[in-house]
Image: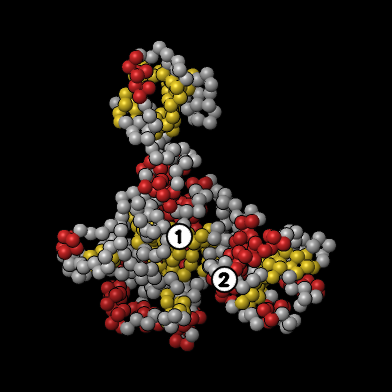
Amino acid sequence: MYRTHTCGQLRKENISQTVTLAGWVQKIRNLGAMTFIDIRDRYGITQLVVEEHATEAVRETASSLGREFVIQTTGRVVERSAKNPKLPTGEIEVVVEALKVLNASLTPPFTIEDQSDGGDELRMKYRFLDLRRNPLKNALILRHKLTHEVRSFLDQRGFLEIETPYLIGSTPEGARDFVVPSRMNPGEFYALPQSPQTFKQLLMVAGYDRYFQIVRCFRDEDLRADRQPEFTQIDCEMSFVEREDILENFEAMAKHLFKTLLDIDFPEAFPRMTWADAMEKYGSDKPDIRFGMTFNDITKLAQGKGFGVFDSAEYVGAICAEGCAGYTRKQLDELTEFVKRPQIGAKGMVYVRIDADGHYKSSVDKFYTPEDLSVWAQACGAKPGDLLLILSGPRKQTLSALCELRLEMGSRLGLRDKSRFAPLWVVDFPLLEWDDETQRYYAMHHPFTSPKPEDIDLFDTDPGKVRANAYDFVVNGVEVGGGSLRIFDSALQNKMFQVLGFTPEEAQRQFGFLMNAFKFGAPPHGGIAFGLDRWCSLFGGADSIRDFIAFPKNNSGRDTMIDAPAPLAQAQLDELSLEVREPVKK
Ligand code: ASP
């Protein structure tokens, strides 16, 4: 037997037992007469003590140990004289009677501590060592628990977990596909699924009315903290449901996860907000509603007083930062610089301070009287001590710049506490999005999303106004899930393809299988998919999803540990009938 207990298991009750432990050397302290060794495994750390009167063999082995050696020891559990209340095993130690090196280790390139001295790149290259650290271990445990709770919740509600293939054709989620050449079909390629969307719909046609899958999805997109080229969805679909049934079911799942993982109750229903309101009040389809500071449209109030910037603007919007009238020149300059960053793109920022006595001071005093400013303040619900921050310009860009400014202010004012959660549903998205560059409509969600029945007539007259029966689940400004009721009628589906600019032949070639299936009794259906990695990072209080993935890619989509992607050998290329045009840069 390699071990009788784990390294996190022994307590006072075990005193005077003889135990065998196995694990890694965390730390060695040689105090002359005695040597202390911390032994670690996934479960914790136990202190071993090699006493002066230990056998020669034990003392010799102890002196040969280095960090991360794998050892096995047998000894007696005794009460510690100097207890360590920070360790669950801190009341005891094990007096070593036998000690064996199971495997030596090179000195690790960084410290295996909660706070490691290793840089990001080095830790990615030695991910197997990084994973020995507590923060990563806890992240993977959280992920396991979350997955487990999802499965048990959905199982209880009659959902079947069904796998769908990875080697498929193009899927319509709007990103680039990863493709895989087919050796047996030279010159032809599979695409990896961006989501199992079409397959889960086919499962509905097949009669599996409650489906889910915890499934890897692949999207060739530029990476960010919350994006990886392969990520995991909790993918779900239901038949014979209306929107309400789906929202009820998955709101219950979300509440179950908050309760079981974080012990947080949400007695009330999650708020719902239309997409139009979210854009108007927060400038985002994933509003962070942990704090207010919503937008106020003061376009009309601000125009006609000779201030050219506002007069010529399509939109003038203000947020009210409570209690910030004391902001210094420097702080205001910083904010102006912030909104002028190229990614945010505002031309400038106007402020109005309302001091404690109700006096107004603004950066546009030349154009506006205190009475003018007080009208704005009123429109924004501002009171003495508050600060108005105002941006103007084209509507869409200004709303999104104001969104960034609001989030920045929220962060500065400590209003985005990671231990507080504010979930909501955003509903009634537009069905289509116009793209100026390609002069065509794109599906905002995907082409199988059903329009709201009352908007179907607009399809022919004003497609941009058609609202979708789509919904997103948003928590703290993060889109955690999204889905829709689907089109299940082949004529309507055809119409949708047509609006999206597909010729009937293209639609047939790409999605003929689904259209065909719809002719064989497709039930009304709808579903949702959640980003498992995002859910984990939210619950784990982290910004990046990377820590919750055992072996993630870096920002250039590389796995630096196994050094992938890599060029293929000529023989492999030949076998696949592939020719690489550019010399491969390495
Ligand atoms: N397939 C969609 C997605 O990946 C989710 C859904 O509509 O169920 O976003």
**Which residue in the rendered view is the most extreme toward the right?**
357
Q: Residue 359's x, y, as percent?
A: 82, 66
Q: Amino acid at mark 2?
A: Gly
Location of residue 439 (image quadrant):
bottom left
Q: Residue at x 56, y 64 (%)?
A: 287
Res 392 seen here: yes
Q: Tell me, for residue 345, which label it has, or none.
A: 2
Mark 1 vs 2, N-terminal side: 1
Q: Residue 146's x, y, as percent?
A: 43, 49
Quadrant (top left, top right, bottom left, bottom right) of the N terminus: top left
The answer to whether 366 is drawn above or below residue 16 in the figure is: below
Q: Do callouts 1 and 2 mark residues in contact (Cβ within 8 Å)? A: no
Res 238 seen here: no
Looking at the picture, tell me which residue is in the foreground, 500 or 268.
500
Q: Residue at x 49, y 61 (%)?
A: 479
- Element type at marker 1? loop
Location of residue 488 (image quadrant):
bottom left
Q: Residue at x 55, y 48 (%)?
A: 264
For marks 1 and 2, give the CA distance: 20 Å
Q: Residue 377's x, y, as percent?
A: 75, 69
- Element type at marker 2? loop
Residue corresponding to mark 1: 224
**Which residue in the rendered view is the most extreme toward the top?**
53
Q: Amino acid at mark 1?
A: Arg
Q: Residue 559's x, y, as percent?
A: 34, 53
Looking at the picture, tell me which residue is in the foreground, 451 or 446.
446
